[in-house]
Image (spheres, grey):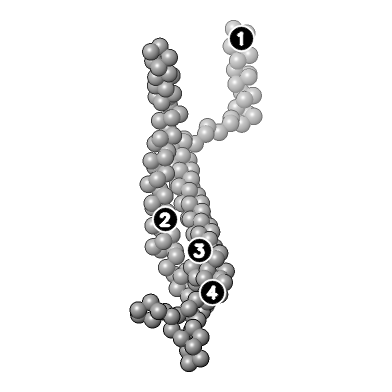
Amino acid sequence: MGFVSKLADEFKQFALRGNVIDLAVGVVIGTAFTKIVNSLVSNLILPPLNLLTSKFGFNFANWAYTIRTESPKLDAKGEMVKDAAGRPEMLVQDYPILKYGPFIETVVDFLLISIAIFLFVKAINAAKKRLDTAKTPDPVPEPSEEILLLRQIRDSLAEKK
């Protein structure tokens, strides 16, 4: 029982540390932020991009490496359909083996999401910088050499008295 209670105490210390709680808050906020960015990309950026790419005949979703397969054509009863010579009619189909189009689409989505996040963070940092500069008071200017010299004369006269 001592080992389990010691392990429970160590876990409690680990779980209640500030770093773990900060990480949990970051994950929750990151999840919410991901929803915002995904909505931005899928609802505002991708529709015009899809319209543009469809005008030029690009449709990444259908891009794939295919092989051509032949199989006997079947009728409604499930029997092979034969031609006039008695040979079975063959049904020729393209079977996709490597669907690289959806991968390219995912990479494009990632790049768009990355750009959106970059611009969003950049805007937040610029706003934060403006707020920080507005809060800090103007620095006191350095006194001129004449003022410094007058202060030295004043201090030396005070020492003589």
Q: Which tag is nearer the camera, tag 4 or tag 1? A: 4
Residue at position x 45%, y 29% in the image = 19
Q: Tell me if residue 24 can be seen.
A: yes
Comes first in the chain, label 4 or label 1: 4
Disc 1 target residue: 159
Comes first in the chain, label 3 or label 2: 2
The image shows residue 123 at horizontal and vertical percentages of 47, 50
The image shows residue 56 at horizontal and vertical percentages of 52, 77
The amino acid type of the residue labelled 4 equals Thr
> Counting other residues with Cα less than 10 Å from the Cα at mark 2, is it few (<14), some (14-19), or many (20 or more)?
some
Q: Secondary structure at mark 1?
A: helix
Q: Secondary structure at mark 2?
A: helix
The amino acid type of the residue labelled 3 equals Pro
The amino acid type of the residue labelled 2 equals Asn
Marks 4 and 3 close (CB-CB < 8 Å):
no
Disc 4 target residue: 69
The span from disc 1 to disc 3 (Cα, nearest Å) is: 85 Å
Residue at position x 63%, y 19% in the image = 152
Determine the image quadrant of residue 45.
bottom left
Residue at position x 43%, y 14% in the image = 3
> Counting other residues with Cα less than 10 Å from the Cα at mark 3, is it few (<14), some (14-19), or many (20 or more)?
some
The span from disc 2 to disc 4 (Cα, nearest Å) is: 39 Å
Q: Which mark is residue 38?
A: 2
Residue 131 sits above or below residue 14 on the image: below
The span from disc 4 to disc 1 (Cα, nearest Å) is: 107 Å
Q: Which tag is nearer the camera, tag 3 or tag 2? A: 3
The span from disc 3 to disc 2 (Cα, nearest Å) is: 17 Å
Residue 40 sits above or below residue 71 on the image: above
Disc 3 target residue: 102
